[in-house]
Image (tube, grey):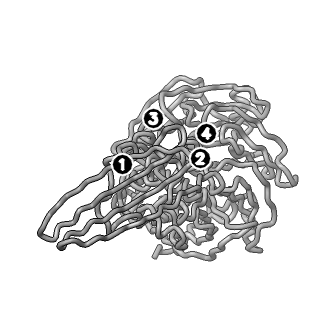
Amino acid sequence: MDGYFMNNQNSGNNNPNNHNNNPNNNNNNSNNNNSSSTHSLLSQLGGGNTTRTSPFFSLLRLTSQANLQDLLNGTLNENNINNNSNSNNNNSNNNNNNNNNNNNNNHNNNNNNYNNNYNNNNNNNNNNNNNNNNNNHNNNNNNNNNGSSGHSNIGSLTIHPSEINELLTHSILSNFPTTTTISKGVFGNATFFETHQRAVKGVDFSPNDHHIFCSAGLDGKCNIYDARFGKLKSSSIISYQGTVNFSGLKFLNGGNKIALSTSSNKLLIFDVEKAAVVQSFDRCCFSGPFRTSIAIDPSNSNLLVTPNITGKGLSHIDIRSPTPIKNIDQIHQNTINDIQILNQQWSRHFGGSNLIMTASSDSSAKILDSQKNTFKQFDFSSHQNSITVSPESPPTNNNSCLLVGGDKLTVFQIDGSISNVFFIPQSKSIMKLHYTNNGTRLFLSCNDGSLRVLNRTNLKHDHYGTVFKHSREIQDLSISKNDEYLVTASTDSKVGLIRIGEPIFGGTEYGEII
């Protein structure tokens, strides 16, 4: 990647013969630097088309090499951008002799008084109204390097960290172009809500009201829905100490509050009834191109765990305390993509208490405690995005399993041995795994936009089919506690909803989804 960046940066700049010989089209970009734009970064870079890599490499050309690593980590913000651009002066002299036009264009770029002069004089004498262009270009750069890290275009861009994350999500981190949405699958027709204007990063069902769910995304909206009727109940645009872009969410036990992670590394507690932020934790969670995982301790609903600000460790948060109670750094060598806290019965099976499972881009998954003691580690050959266990408690050797999803689905027996490995057709990466609460079905979302389901009998998993398909990757999914509904969050800015079966307890509250 660095090599491509450097080649792309230098191509055309080190060759003094690469000049614009049209006197009517010189330095048009320089004249537009002071014009303000209300368009998003994606639209300004051409992100509206179906080619993912085009806006990404446009952004690379607008950033310095020093910012590249921050860009890839999803931590580049508007204060890091090298926004120093050099103005260009155009002096054109037009002399008309016998209908011949001689145009001299002088372009001067000066950096730290170091001068490299390239003089190219092209004299063409034509008697039939021909244009002769003599171009003198003086390019001066530091370190004898004619590739500049400052670009005149950057001054006209309004850049926010979440837009860079979204740009990454829509380019190199998603290996598929935009595809057609498919609403009908093995469970019938799905409903797609177009209630967000940008990528949706998280969805979750209420732990109390089995038909109520929420969504949040990069547009700063937190939406509440009723699955029975397929209706949006409320929508809140949350602004807290400036513009807020959400990277993940989780309903807190009780169902009246939602934990929201932001692109500014905050964790907000949003009161649904008051429609207001009632608590904030600063610099406690990571924000990158993927969703930010938030896990609730099943034995204490006041305790949350999320990737810390580096993305490689964990923040432990007690919502009764004004600040995070513990930070554990360097658990992984790369970003933690998924977190799940095991219940006491599963924790005891692995020999600990309140154990935490993590899946990371460093090609590993771990089971550890809050003291950083590792009880189990699983190593792979590629990054891992999701981890889960089968829902039965206590776990049993013949029935229970642990699953890790990345470029493939790996099913482990609880002793750590591999039971099975699945490669998902047409998909290069599994983004999220989720069992139904009765454990008979496993749903997995993929970066090709598809939602797939596997039927499960003990350790055996059989692919049943495709449930529906978004036009871009599905980053999150949630299932109602009674196993009646499923909802998805996608970077295509849509929320998907489908009824997957009769409720496993209580009467059905099914209403026609319209």
Disc 4 marks a residue whose amino acid type is Thr
Q: Are marks 2 and 1 in contact (CB under 8 Å)?
A: no
Which residue is identified by label 3?
Answer: 460
> Of discs 4 and 3, which sits in the foreground?
4
Using the image, determine if residue 478 lies above or below residue 118: below
Mark closest to the chain's N terminus, 2 or 1: 2
| Residue at horizontal 25 percent and vertical 54 percent from the top | 122
Residue topped by disc 2: 112
| Residue labelled with disc 4 | 335
Residue type at numbered disc 3: Lys
CA–CA distance between discs 1 and 4?
50 Å
Using the image, tell me which numbered label, if any, was put on residue 60: none
Which residue appears farthest toward the front when viewing the image? 97
Percent across and percent down for residue 285 are 71, 49
Labelled disc at residue 119: 1
- Can residue 408 be seen by looking at this rendering? no
Which of the 4 image quadrants contains residue 128?
A: bottom left
Residue at x 66% of width, y 31% of height: 367
- Around disc 4, counting alpha carbons within 10 Å, would you say few (fewer than 14), some (14 to 19), or many (20 or more)? many
- On screen, residue 95 versus residue 373, left or right, reads left
Q: Residue at x 40, y 59 (%)?
A: 106
Three-letter code, disc 1? Asn
Pick whichever of labels 3 and 1 is earlier in the sequence.
1
